[in-house]
Image: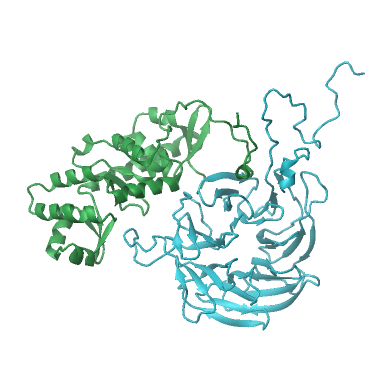
Amino acid sequence: MNRRRRRLASEAFGVKRRRAPGPAQADPLRAGAGSAREAVEALVRLFPRGLFEDALPPIALRSQVYSLLPDRTLADLQLKELQEQGEIRIIQLGFDLDAHGIVFTEDYRTRVLKACDGRPCAGVVQKFLASVLPACGDLSFQQDQMTQTYGFRDPEITHLVNAGVLTVRDAGSWWLAVPGAGRFIKFFVKGRQALLSMLRRAKYRELLLSELLGRRSPSAVRLGLAYHVHDLIGAQLVDCVPTSSGTLLRLPDT
Amino acid sequence: MSDLADNPKIPVGYLKAWQPGLITAVTPECMVYSSYSMLSGGSDGVIVLYDLENSSRQPYYTCKAVCSVGRSHPDVHKYSVETVQWYPHDTGMFTSSSFDKTLKVWDTNTLQAADVFNFEETVYSHHMSPAATKHCLIAVGTRGPKVQLCDLKSGSCSHILQGHRQEILAVSWSPRHDYILATASADSRVNLWDVRRASGCLLTLDQHNGKKSQAVESANTAHNGKVNGLCFTSDGLHLLTVGTDNRMRLWNSSNGENTLVNYGKVCNDSRKGLKFTVSCGCSSEFVFVPYGSTIAVYAVHSGEQLTMLKGHYKSVDCCVFQSNFQELYSGSRDCNILAWVPSLYEPIPDDDDEATTKSQLNPAFEDAWSSSDEEG
């Protein structure tokens, strides 16, 4: 009964009066997740494990989480909490400054151990996973941190780089990395470009989301259309326009 | 403003007021308001003064230009006027700075240039402290890396702040403290200065808040590109910056901490300053950022994009908020200045049974046609 009250001043600059939210939308991808954790779990299910023969932990992207949780500040805060609790790791993917991959720590740990099983660097990697990962939740590590705080010697750090667990960032600092993620990044960048070109070739540079998902996936898109669409929406590379036939994805004019 | 909202009988509902034809060949590059008058500076060096009061009580009104410093004025700027500002304490004086490497101080009553400061490089931005009573310093940001402080009383540059490495794209004094100045530069840094201190800046804003783990370069930068625009919130507690990395960041101005509010992609491809503005006096503040030919409105503290104000035909260059009328003025390349007024809705009746016979229409739009067929 008290729903109908005078609108707050925060709506004063809106041009149109907002409608009351209608029934649940028929759009497949736009039903939002409740929290960042659920969003990451849903996205991790979209990741094609078979493509990499289960050697890679399922990676979700931060932009995909923004697509499921429209309130970005809240999403950032919840992801930071999950990172501090040690449940997820954020990985710098390298092709874009803002592209952060999110992996569950457990998945990461099992895959990394499996990847370096039997190789000479196995011992060092296990030491790294046991001592550094739980202690330091950052994306990157500095030289003095590694040598003094955690007691790694230079040859050991070289082993870690060879194993793919660390990537060189600049002199004396390294990013945390997923071994074998190079293929994933290649597929991801190609898939993103392919999807954007699909939109560019469409009439008026726009497509209904349901139609886009129903189309045959082009050969360059190996990770799945839904995976890429979440990323495009969250990275604001396409505009989402709500229409009566569902969500419309439109390329911005610039 | 509050009694308009309480009393529903006054017709409200206008959204924007047109001012066609007033600005002839000028694109407003910058605008600033005083209580009832507005200054706008154009890309051909012309400065025009408008009277903002709406005495006609019509929903769509036109503000008249009171006077202007036209092309034929002997002291007119030779190139585009980048920033204009009223003297903070009254409208007897205003200052304007331009690409012709000068900052001119004008007397409003006689429209003569009272003083001219010359610089070696083009002037991108200047600002005089709105709250300061102990000094009359104008901070000037030019193409060189040094911020110059000009003193109005003595008529010369009093000192220089060194610390940036590239051109200074925006400067702004804090509305809270007399001596605190923020400067934004193309070297991706934003510095907070206390101008009384001889040695360097107080703080450099770091977008990662000191955690080097996420930064690609080790230097502490506010943005990953040039920092184009600066605006303090009206209480001076927070500072908003926009950069060419298409991000807008909200900082705590007392300790320089990035509050990590995420506004999403705030498109910014301006090569000089982006003049955006923050509302003043609203219950939750908004920030209005020009985006192409529209203005994007965000809530400052939550980061949510509320709406896009569409009305201009070409790209919007500047916007400014008037707290007395709670109006936003925006100037664009299509030579128009639009005034945006918040539209107030009629309160929805709480009780559904009560039949509402009161017309929802603005009486200006009501016609005298009778709907009844019987009336002869």
**Percent from the top left, x then y, of residue A98?**
37, 52
Q: Tell which residue pokes out farthest to the right in this image.
A: B376
Q: Residue at x 35, y 34 (%)?
A: A225
Q: In the rendered image of this protein, which colour is used for chain B?
A: cyan
Instruction: Give the tally of numbered discs.
Output: 0
**Quadrant location of residue B44?**
bottom right
Looking at the picture, tell me which residue is in the foreground, B175 or B147: B175
Q: Name the side, left or right, on which B57 lies relative to B231.
A: right
User: Can you say whether B113 is above or below A62 in the image?
Assistant: below
Evaluate whether residue B296 shows in this view.
yes
**Percent from the top left, x then y, of residue A218?**
33, 34
Q: Name the side, left or right, on which B214 lies relative to B260.
A: left
**Percent from the top left, x then y, of residue A62?**
36, 46
- Quarter of the image with the C terminus of chain B in it: top right
Looking at the picture, tell me which residue is in the foreground, B241 or A191: B241
Q: Residue at x 59, y 66 (%)?
A: B176
Q: Name the side, left or right, on which A166 lies relative to B149.
A: left
**Quadrant location of residue B306?**
top right
**Quadrant location of residue A124?**
bottom left
Colour approach in the figure:
by chain
Identify by letter the chain in green.
Answer: A
Q: Tell which residue pokes out farthest to the top in this image.
A: B374
User: Can you say whether B244 is above or below B107 in the image?
Assistant: above
Looking at the picture, tell me which residue is in the foreground, B260 or A7: A7
Evaluate whether residue B243 shows in this view.
no
Looking at the picture, tell me which residue is in the foreground, B72 or B84: B84
